[in-house]
Amino acid sequence: MHPSLADTRAAVFWLDREDAPTDAPALAADRRADLVVVGAGFTGLWTALQAAESDPGRRIVVLEAATTALGASGRNGGFCEASLTHGLGNGLAHWPDELPTLLRLGDENLDDILATLDRHHIDCAAERTGAMDVAVEPWQVDELHELAEASERLGVEVEFLDQDAVRAQVDSPTYLAGLWSRHSAAMVDPARLAWGLRAAAGSLGVEFHDHSPVRSLRRSGAGVEARTDGGRVTADRAVVATNAYRRPLTRIRRHVIPVYDHVLVTEPLSAEQWVAVGWEGRQGMSDSGNQFHYYRRTADGRILWGGWDVRYHFGGRVGPAVEHHDPTTQTLARHFFATFPQLEGLRFTHRWSGPIASTTRFTCAWGTIHGGRTAWAAGYTGLGVGASRFGARVALDLVDGVTSEWTELSMVRRRPFPFPPEPARWLAVQATRAAIMRSDRRGGRPGPWLRMLDRFGVGLDS
Ligand SMILES: Cc1cc2nc3c(=O)[nH]c(=O)nc-3n(C[C@H](O)[C@H](O)[C@H](O)COP(=O)(O)OP(=O)(O)OC[C@H]3O[C@@H](n4cnc5c(N)ncnc54)[C@H](O)[C@@H]3O)c2cc1C
């Protein structure tokens, strides 16, 4: 075992605190509502809050299988990015014509998130520090140059940093160059964000029920009916916000699969250790390989370090039984000290993983069923902290039958290419993971499998 992991606890750093809110009572009787929301992660919370803000009289009930922030929303890196397209490169590949609009909507979405924090006094340690991609291999320097040029063409403000400049920001001997986008991201404490959104929605009259998994959701009369073990909610409309989870709408799984992403958090660094690293800009950092790490400072002086491997479990299993994978944790720890050798001796206090809902195009997908009375939004891949507000806004318009600039986007109207059924799905994911690793070893050159996927505009990412 890597010595830095000797006393690491299997616990989510963001959730490991005494002041977490108490759970809402489980649904224990039948209820009637205008809107029922299934799932209380960011998508469900933003759905409930935006619906309550835009229509204060609306009766809204949120049903959550566990409790707020126990899914991906409380387990992520806290990079709240403006991008709705899982980055500029992916946006260019899929929606070159629509991209200027998507960029503007993404900026507005991030501004609106930060305005919501102010309006509802949500303290989630948000800092608009931006995000920086770093090149750790020569081929990645070329890619950063290309991204810088594309950004300039599209009017996106970025700064290309050569080796000295990037190391003056954050010091790692592995860095060759960096691309800093100063305004495109805020770092947040995701659990506090989720809890704050829930409190804000609650203050506007939204009713929450934790420990109330929805067993079935079906059409009922002119509306829908969500059944839980303790009662049912009949409502005019439903929004399903269960992201990587299978139920109650198994059909979402054609387009969205759960892949596990792993995270470590260090003990707080000493003042000398921070001097050795720099990082006064507190940017969110990512390296630029196909397999990549993302990392950031926490408000209390630790480093969160996650990413690299994505693990898919046959049949799309999610839950505690598949959450831990020691080899991935060990690899992450080794990579951390390769990046920051000056921190040798630092220890990790927390390790965990969470299910990322991934689509073949790496962005959210939407759909409606039950004659338009139910909408779903899922599959942000690794960039859902910010995009989930947009996902929820679109789902609300879809379920309310409103035609808006958002619902007319081709990103919204067209679903991602579906995943094949099992066992082909598992085999395709494993083949793609192996091809991605090979490509990173070969200077980023895609082999025949990745070239074939590229031709179809599909892939695997976290
Ligand atoms: C390790 C990790 C790191 C990440 N890092 C980042 C990052 O730094 N930046 C970023 O933008 N994105 C990141 N993401 C992705 C981001 O966290 C997600 O896209 C986002 O949280 C999705 O929110 P959600 O509400 O759609 O899903 P979730 O938060 O997963 O919420 C779904 C909810 O539905 C509930 N549910 C499931 N089934 C039922 C049912 N039958 N009845 C009732 N409730 C049900 C679940 O319990 C859960 O609470 C990361 C994800 C992971 C796992």
Image: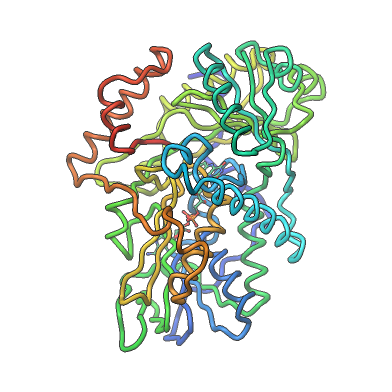
Which quarter of the figure has residue 217? Answer: bottom left
Which quarter of the figure has residue 358? Answer: top left
State the scheme by which the image is colored. rainbow
Q: Position of residue 400 (x, y in %)?
A: 46, 76
Q: Position of residue 233 (x, y in %)?
A: 41, 81
Direction left: furthest residue? 423
Camera-side residue of 218 and 409: 409
Relative to 208, residue 326 above or below = above
Q: State left or right for residue 227 relative to residue 6.
A: left
Q: Position of residue 373 (x, y in %)?
A: 37, 77
Relative to 397, residue 258 above or below = above
Which quarter of the figure has residue 170? Answer: top right
Camera-side residue of 221 and 416: 416
Total numbered labels: 0
Q: Position of residue 240 (x, y in %)?
A: 41, 66
Q: State left or right for residue 416 relative to residue 153.
A: left
The residue that appears at 47% across and 38% down in the rendered structure is 92
Q: In which quarter of the image is the C terminus?
A: top left
